[in-house]
Amino acid sequence: MLTKKSYFSLAFMVAVSLGMVSVASAATVIAPVHIGLAKVSGHQEKVLTAMDGHTLYYFTRDSADKATCTASCAAMWPPLRTSGPIAPHVPNIPGKFTATKGANGWQVNYKGHPLYTFQGDKIAGQANGNGIFGGTWWAVTPTVKPLSTASTQPEPHKSTGW
C-alpha cells in the first residue's frame, strides 16, 4: 500500500523522467563546444569546435559578449547557439563560457568572444575563414585572449605549427 509520502515521491520521479519538472538549473547546461584540430594558416592547430567538429571563429568587430554579426552576416557566419544560460566551464577547455541573448538568440561566448561557424568550412577540420575579410575573422584557440569591455581587440591567432 502506498503512503501519501511514497505516492508523492513516485509522482515526482515520474514527472522528472517525463521532463515535466526540472531538478537542475538552466546554468548546468554545458556549452556545445569541443577541442579539435584544424588546418590554420597551413599548420594543424588546436581549435575550439562545434559538436559536429566544425571550427569556431570570433569576429573582431564584436564587443564583450555582444555579437555584431547578425541577419545576413549570420547567414554566412552562423552563430553557435544554445537554449539558454550555460555552465561557465567545459571539461578540458581553459577559460570561461557564457551565453547571452541577443539578435541571434542565445549565443555561446568564450572568454567574452561570441562564437560562430563558417559556411565556407564544408567538413570538420577546415579553417577556411581564418583571417579573411580584412583580418576580421579568426579561428578560436583555447589560448585566445579574453575580450572584456575595457580591453582592445585581441591579437589574431598566429599559427605555431606543432
Image (cartoon, rainbow, N blue to C red):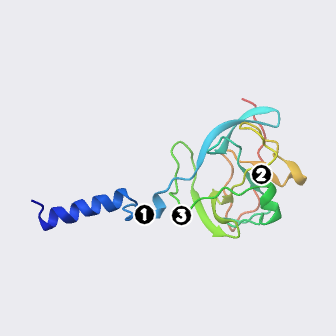
Measured in 3D between alpha carbons, the distance from the residue under mark 3 to the one under mark 1, in whole angstroms, is: 9 Å
Side of 153 where 49 appears, left or right: left
Residue under the image location 66 percent in, 40 percent down? 53
Vertical position of residue 18 compared to residue 34: above or below: below
Task: Answer whether labels 2 and 1 touch (C-beta < 8 Å).
Answer: no
Which residue, given by chain and number where applicable, does mark 2 sit on?
Answer: 155
Task: Residue 43 in the image: state x and y as whole percent.
Answer: 78, 32
Residue under the image location 47 percent in, 63 percent down? 26
Vertical position of residue 42 compared to residue 91: above or below: above
Side of 111 where 44 appears, left or right: right
Which residue, given by chain and number where applicable, does mark 1 sit on?
Answer: 25
Vertical position of residue 40 compared to residue 15: above or below: above
| Whether residue 142 is visible | no
Measured in 3D between alpha carbons, the distance from the residue under mark 3 to the one under mark 2, in whole angstroms, is: 28 Å
Which residue, given by chain and number where applicable, does mark 3 sit on?
Answer: 85
Measured in 3D between alpha carbons, the distance from the residue under mark 2 to the one under mark 1, in whole angstroms, is: 36 Å
Residue under the image location 90 percent in, 53 percent down? 134
Tag 2: amino acid: Glu
